Every structure is written in structure tokens, then in C-alpha cells.
Image (cartoon, coloured by chain):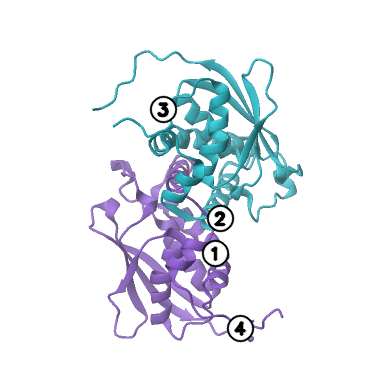
Chain colours: A cyan, B purple
Amino acid sequence: MPPAGPRSGDAIFASVERVNAELFTLTYGATVRQLLTDLEEVEEVNKQLDQMGYNIGIRLIDEFLAKSNISRCVDFKETADVIAKVGLKMFLGVNATVTNWDAEGTCCSIILEDNPLVDFVELPDTCQGLHYCNILSGVIRGALEMVSMKTEVTWLRDMLRGDDMFELQVKLLKQIPEEYPYKDDE
Amino acid sequence: MPPAGPRSGDAIFASVERVNAELFTLTYGATVRQLLTDLEEVEEVNKQLDQMGYNIGIRLIDEFLAKSNISRCVDFKETADVIAKVGLKMFLGVNATVTNWDAEGTCCSIILEDNPLVDFVELPDTCQGLHYCNILSGVIRGALEMVSMKTEVTWLRDMLRGDDMFELQVKLLKQIPEEYPYKDDE
């Protein structure tokens, strides 16, 4: 059956199985705290969160493609829009916008208006270098790699560090050529 | 304003903020995997997951009491029913039943028909001693402690270990007397 066309993030979010956001937030918080205890170095925790996110992203992309009916983006601009409008809505239930494009169309910022990961979170002074939401940048990096885009994803602004919003820079490093045409199973 | 009476788990679950269950499942999976890497000993991971859950439970109880309009259970039997019918529904969206009561009414089993924590999970042979869902038993233990019940929560059956359901034994060890009457803030 051919895909019925892309679905909105809202519609998908309403139709998928969900869990209570506070449970998710607290579970994530407990994870970060545990990593801080086990690894001690904040920089090491940043790396691990990113790696955890990457491992999640390379699996989550399947659910994303299956549920969104999005098969292929024409370019990186469309990809960024889809992440902001469909992906983040579908998984976290948040609204996001894309801005700050460079002239080449290979680097932009995703602005998060809301972020359930950080509800009730305050960083103690000892954790000022922590990128608390690094799991999210890792997820995006991992998911994009599975659709042949090698990216660098960096937090430019972070409300836990006193900024007025979350700004995630997504930079396309390389488009990996696909080696064989994908085929439908049917 | 006096509480309007208890609300059903379904109604609460429908009204609270939620995130995609698959994201939650994969995030939890990444956490367990990370702990296995960092701590190496399966038994140590079991302990940490339980402790993480405990830390979550002592906070989640506030959301539970606020959203459910449940102020006080008459006895441990009612408490167990509330966990199964309201709590697990409200946070994980799952149905659960209470069974196997002992004669004293201080020990029972909660049977989970479904468990989003374990979707897509298979334990490798090296992890056979892992209580993958130990975070959940920790949450229940922590939450109950905040309402003055010291409990022991143990997995008796586990689908990841080949059982046909999840069975969580909840044993009341001690009811901690409340030292002062709670007062409303108003």
C-alpha cells in the first residue's frame, strides 16, 4: 500500500502509545544523577548521554518513519523542518521552530519552546558544565545518521544555564550516498 | 476546596501530559545498558535501578495524590488496589490486578498485563540475573514510604525470564505512625 502522505506531529502524538510525562522526566533525571555518581566527570556524563541518545535515535527512526508516513526529504532544510514540526511533537509533545539558517543551507538552529526533560530540574553549582539534555542531541544525530546524514548537534542555548530558550544547532557534515535502492518488503 | 472524590486511572491518564511510550522505553533501555557497562555486576545494577526507582517514587507520589484526588486509603488492601487500578494506569497506561492475598492482608501480588518498559527487550545470557524492571518496584516502595508504609517489593514472575506475566509481590513491613496531622496549605 502506498503511503497516505505525511501526517502532522499532533495527529501522530495523539494516536501513539504514551506514558506520563512526569514519570519520563523523573526517570531521565534519575539516570543523569546516576551517571554523575558513577562517572564523576561532568564531561564524561555529557558524552555518555549523547551516546545513549545516539543509540536511541538509530532505533527511534524506524518508529518515526512508520508512524509519520514521511518517506524522504528533498533536502536538509525539509529535514530540519520535519524534525522540529513532526519529530519533536511526536515523541516529546513539544513545539519547535527552525531558524538561523546559514547561506549554504547546511546549518540551522532548532528552538524548543518547551522541554519536558527539564521540568523541576535545577543544576547545582558543581554541574555547571553539564549538558543535561544531551540525550536529545544524541537522538537527533543518531536518527539522521540512519537516513544517511552525518551531523553535528550542539546546544547553543540552554535554559538550565540561564538562557531564555533551548537552541540546538544542527550542522550537516556529510550526506552519505545510499549504496543500494531501498525496496518495499511487498 | 475539598477534593472532588477519587478519579479513575483512565481519566487521569487521559488528562496529564504525556510523552511517546517508545521514547520512554528506549530511554530506560539505554539507562539499563549504561548501568551494566558502568557497574559490571548484574546484582549491583539491580540495586541501582531499585534505588533510582525509590528516588522517583518519593517525588511521584505528590503528582499522584494531586491528580488522583485520593487522600487516604483505609487499609493496605485498598492501597494495593489503588496502585494497581489508578497508579499504574495513570503513569504507565497499563492495566493491573491484585491477587494472592495472605491471611493477614499484609502481602499481595500485583499482576501486570502489559509493561511498556520491556517492549523490544530481550536479555542476553550474561544478564539472566537482571531484574530489568527493578525501577518499577523501587517506585512503588518509595511512593508507599511517603504515605507511611514501609514495604518490601519483589518480582516473583518476570516475562523477560520466561514467565507468562509480571508478578510483583508487595509486602507491608511496617506502618509508620504519622507524627503530626497533615494540614492543608490554605
Give the amino acid at mark 4.
Pro
Give the amino acid at mark 1.
Leu
Q: Tag 2's secondary structure? A: helix
- Which of the chains bears the disc numbered 4? B
- Of the pair B105 and B184, the residue shown nearer to us: B184
Q: CA distance from mark 3 to mark 1?
A: 39 Å
> In the image as oriented, which residue stretches furthest toward the front?
A4
Residue contact between numbered discs 1 and 2, judged by CB atoms under 8 Å: yes
Is residue B40 toward the left or the right of residue B4 in the image? left
Q: Which quadrant is the C terminus of chain B positioned in?
A: bottom right
Q: Which mark is residue A71?
A: 3
The residue wearing badge 2 is: A26
- Of the pair A19 and B58, the residue shown nearer to us: A19
Q: Tag 4's secondary structure? A: loop
Residue contact between numbered discs 2 and 4, judged by CB atoms under 8 Å: no
Is residue B185 toward the left or the right of residue B162 in the image? right
Name the residue rendered at 32%, 70% in the picture. Answer: B97
Q: Tag 3's secondary structure? A: loop
User: Callout 4: 10 Å neighbours few (<14), some, many (20+)?
Assistant: few
The residue wearing badge 4 is: B2
